[in-house]
Amino acid sequence: MADLRSDFLGIKSPNPFWLASAPPTDKKVNVLRAFEAGWGGVVWKTLGTQVKNVSSRYSSLNYNGQKAMGFNNIELISDRPLEINLKEIKEVLKEFPDRAMIVSLMADNDRKSWHEMVKKAQDTGAHGLELNFGCPHGMVERGMGASVGQDPEIAKMVVEWVMEVAKIPVITKLTPNVHSVVPAGKAVISAGTDALSLINTIQSITGIDLDTLIPNPNVGGKSVFGGYCGPAVKPIALKMLTTLAQDPDTRKVPISGIGGISTWRDAVEFILLGASNVQVCTAAMIQGFRIITDLCDGMSNWMDEKGYKSINDFRGLSVPAITRWEELDINFHIIANINQDKCIHCGLCYITCEDTSHQSIDIKKGLPYNTYTIKDEECVGCNLCKIVCPVEDCITMEVHRKGDEYLNWTEYQKRGLPLNDH
Amino acid sequence: MPIQNNRLPESELEKNFSDIHPPFEHAEGAAIEANRCLNCYDAPCTKLCPTSINVPLFIKQIASGNIKGSAHTIFSSNIMGGGCSKVCPVEKLCEGACVFNLLEETPISIAKLQRYSTEQAIHEKWKLFTRKPSNGKKVAIVGAGPAGLACAHSLSLEGTEVTIFEKEAKGGGLMTYGVAAYKVTPTFCKEEVDYILSLGGISVQYEKQLGKDIQLADLQKNFDAVFLGIGVGVARSLEIPGENLEGVMDAISFIYNLRTRNYSQISVGDKVAVIGMGMTAIDAATQSKRLGAKEVTMIYRRTEHEKPCTEEELDLAKLDGCSFLWLSNPKEILGENGKVKNLVCSKMKLGEPDASGRRSPVDTGETFTIEVDMVIKAAGQIPFEGLVNNSKLDNKVGKIKIDNSGMTNLKGVFSGGDAVNGGKEVVDAVQAGKDAAKGILAYLKK
Ligand SMILES: Cc1cc2nc3c(=O)[nH]c(=O)nc-3n(C[C@H](O)[C@H](O)[C@H](O)COP(=O)(O)OP(=O)(O)OC[C@H]3O[C@@H](n4cnc5c(N)ncnc54)[C@H](O)[C@@H]3O)c2cc1C
Ligand SMILES: Cc1cc2nc3c(=O)[nH]c(=O)nc-3n(C[C@H](O)[C@H](O)[C@H](O)COP(=O)(O)O)c2cc1C
Ligand code: SF4
Ligand code: SF4
């Protein structure tokens, strides 16, 4: 049986799944329930100067009948009194000493406030701190959250203040609302942060009520840009994570991967791209803490199948596979193949290829079922037909190299090879 | 116990005749099902729909919340799309072709989704079509059944003035008077007819029978074209002794009564024999059972393999507790005091394939007798041979012959539906009405 235990900067947890700083971690009752369900750790809902929230707060993006493929919120940091939060953190630590307890912080933008916050948080006995430089709404207007994370210089300064008093590991949580997360990552590492986490939410408008014409969420007839998260943001988070895993400076520190994780598969992907552990928010908010069962179980079974004994065995294994476009092998060529025994004649491959790709699928009309075949000479190997085909492994992409040798774009140009070869 | 009415209490009758394909109760159910549809290209479901409804489009319109658009898509191809969603044998049409069958998965509930949008349109009287300006032409239509109504709607859309002559007091044809009561209610049939007529440009003269109250020659004289959508007539007689005994009935009349009166007033036997295995036979058998008959036996001269009804229909009869005598051919009906008492049948065996490609039944010479108090004949319907011949219409044993444009041998006289095909489904009649309208419009332009 695979060993799911996780050690993040010496912070131990029975599995690599932490609940991200958000409503699931904002009070003792929730966190106790999460630990009972089996979560490895929590990042307590961000503490700071107490705030006031509005109503409503959330909205979502539904797609083809699937609810909340994207989720959006306009909540602020914790709206409970600081003292209660601190007291509850202590109590939870006592009840579940084997789980990771990280406290997320966002102080007012001066040295003294940060010092005070850090001290109060570590006095609880928590195992680590997470600096929230990512909240894209509400706090920005007050010079906090993403407005710190978006400016590497300010971020660096704040981390320096924190490190002056921090006695426990410090994770800096980056905002994705930037062109690249690397500059901020480098800056906070140079200031001494022990680790990074990403992503926080992405600024968004999820939709508009077509009767009232008010965007969601509606707060008395008005709305604001919210923070987007959930399955829809996973690809963006993975890309940002990879840029940190590729950079020689940022890859030196452990990274806690966040953003759209809802199944064990998503979590494995984050770890394959360099994350040391993962954090989850939306999936738990949409389905409850019980999802932890399959997150652990699925990851464990996959590890057993692949022969990985611990999380570190596969961490970062996919990073080298991400290269630069110029280095891709132009001689590599694949052609779609339809397995006629599996085909159910839905015609989706045909119409997508015909309308928007390379007109590479032949149609033979039948009543009621048409027959579809690939025109090998026309197929550019784009994957579109395979993507739309509803039958697993009905369309396979088969390798038909254009040449034996590896040939990249730079070399291709150098040799003056023809552009329109098909 | 002999034949009698009011066998079951009102509440039980109500239950027995309630909708056999209940609708989606909630928008969510429709949306879930609509989202399951793959949105096939050149979709098999559409190809097997005789009216070529763009099924994937109307389903995706339900999924996107565009219910009006969805209803419009359906009605553009099939103005009886509402009724068809309840009466079509979809297992051999659209749903039978759905690609999910090839994955051994339940096909998309196309009929139920179609009902979802069309019922809203009909109940809420959505105005989805507008007539073109008048083209100055007048067309007479005989028969307000599916063929006549579809033809009338298509013609009126193009600006033609249409007058329908109908022998019954209500429109809808066999949809109103024939189809099983647990598929469509009289209220629905009326609403559907009203909805079709709400387009305007169509007036209906009820209780006007061609050959009696009106003559074809007059219609030809007074209108620019005529469409005959008169359907087929009474049930074929068995040509065996005893057919005149009390308790022998033809299925069409039995069902006609059922559709026009209260269930409690319909007499049904205790031991009913239904002769035939087509859709009408199944309907007569299941509805006898639902009226309270104790034993219903369906009698067919071939085997289950050659049955003309669909598997689904046979299952319905089985579930209703009907029993079956295969390879049995009625030979004689015996009576006592003028009332049905026994049915004598010949035992058959299968011989060589006939014209339909099915192996034909051959008499073995053996017979057997069963005890019955009612015999319902449902061995096919016969066309209005007399009317057709008197009108000098080219026909094949009463089935009117038409050319590619839907025109009969009489200039300007068109026909379609059961009157031409000898009795198929509602959806075929609708398509025939549409096709004839196209032929008529082309003819009127000449
Ligand atoms: C018992 C039974 C059950 C059926 N069940 C189904 C089913 O579940 N699903 C399905 O799809 N199909 C079913 N059908 C078949 C379907 O009802 C017909 O195919 C369809 O109604 C044919 O339409 P039509 O317009 O051609 O003829 P009809 O529906 O027969 O309409 C003809 C109309 O013309 C009128 N008419 C006839 N003669 C004259 C005249 N001389 N003057 C004036 N008016 C006249 C009639 O009163 C009638 O209104 C069933 C048929 C029967 C008999
Ligand atoms: C309602 C809500 C409130 C959140 N509040 C905080 C917060 O206080 N501090 C913080 O660092 N991140 C906060 N987040 C961001 C999450 O911690 C997480 O980074 C983000 O939702 C992406 O992960 P997910 O796709 O699993 O939800 C919040 C997210 C949501 C949905
Ligand atoms: S998409 Fe797949 S199942 Fe559909 S026609 Fe193409 S190959 Fe067949
Ligand atoms: S065949 Fe089935 S899945 Fe395909 S479009 Fe029709 S209903 Fe949808």
Image (tube, rainbow, N blue to C red):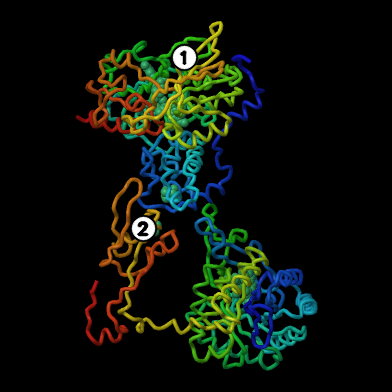
Marks 1/2: CA–CA distance: 55 Å
Q: Is residue B357 left or right of residue A130?
A: left
Q: Looking at the image, which residue sits at the far left?
A: B446
Does residue A276 sit above or below B78 in this rendering? below
Q: Is residue B136 in view from this perspective?
A: yes
Label 2 is placed on what type of residue? Gln
> Disc 1 on helix, strand or loop?
strand
Q: Is residue A40 left or right of residue A185?
A: right
| Quadrant of the image containing the C terminus of chain A | bottom left
Front position in the image: A118 or B430: B430
Q: Position of residue B88 (x, y in %)?
A: 45, 35
Q: Which mark is residue B332?
A: 1
10 Å neighbourhood of mark 2: few (<14), some, or many (≥20)?
few
Q: Residue at x 58, y 18 (%)?
A: B269
Q: Does mark 2 fall on the same chain as mark 1?
A: no
Q: Residue at x 41, y 83 (%)?
A: A323
Q: Quadrant of residue A400?
A: bottom left
Give the total of numbered labels: 2
Label 1 is placed on what type of residue? Glu
Does residue A14 sit above or below A111 in this rendering? above
Q: Which mark is residue A340?
A: 2
> Disc 2 on helix, strand or loop?
loop
Q: Quadrant of residue B45?
A: top left
Q: Position of residue A271 (x, y in %)?
A: 55, 79
